[in-house]
Image: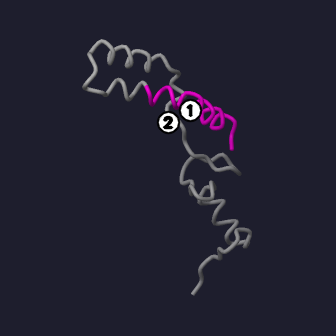
Amino acid sequence: MRKFDYKRRQSFALYEAKRKALQAVATNQNLNISLRWWAQLEKSKLPRKSSLCRVHNHCVETGRSRSVINFYKLSRLQFRRLASKGALAGLRKACW
């Protein structure tokens, strides 16, 4: 995994609990408006890199960010190459 993706995942893990707690307070309609406003303000002060939508899957071999197969964490190109070689257990390129 590339360094920048690893750092984003670490940052997300670090701030995840605080972000979820603030989000719960901000969306709770039973609380008064000033407390919800405060929670929204505190949430906006968190680093942008700690947001889940900033985390993106990358191929562990090449770092390619597009067409990554989540289960194997490989791009489709590397997945096909390794499957053709027989390097992935239980997989074989189809031929009929």
Residue 14, picture quadrant? top right
The numbered mark at residue 69 is none
Q: Is residue 2 magenta?
A: yes
Q: Is residue 34 magenta?
A: no
Name which residue lies at 67% across and 74% down.
Answer: 90
- Residues 73 and 62: in front is 73
Residue 27, picture quadrant? top left
Residue carrying label 2:
52
CA–CA distance between discs 2 and 1? 6 Å
Residue farthest along the front direction in this orientation: 30
Expressed as whole percent of the image width and height from the top left, the position of residue 78 reads: 66, 59
Expressed as whole percent of the image width and height from the top left, the position of residue 57 reads: 57, 46
Residue 85, picture quadrant? bottom right
Region in magenta? 1-21
Q: Amino acid at mark 1?
A: Phe
- What colouring does the structure picture have? one colour
Expressed as whole percent of the image width and height from the top left, the position of residue 54 reads: 51, 34
| Left or right of residue 7, residue 34 in this image | left
Callout 2: few (<14), some (14-19), or many (20+) C-alpha neighbours within 10 Å?
Answer: some
Regarding mark 1 in the picture, which secondary structure is present there?
helix
Residue farthest along the bottom direction in this orientation: 96
Q: Amino acid at mark 2?
A: Leu
The correct choice, above or below, for 77 with respect to 83 in the image is: above
Regarding mark 2 in the picture, which secondary structure is present there?
helix
Majority SS type along the magenta span: helix
Mark 2 touches mark 1? (CB < 8 Å): yes
The correct choice, above or below, for 41 with respect to 16 in the image is: above
Name which residue lies at 54% across and 54% down.
Answer: 67
Name which residue lies at 59% across and 79% down.
Answer: 94
Residue carrying label 1:
12
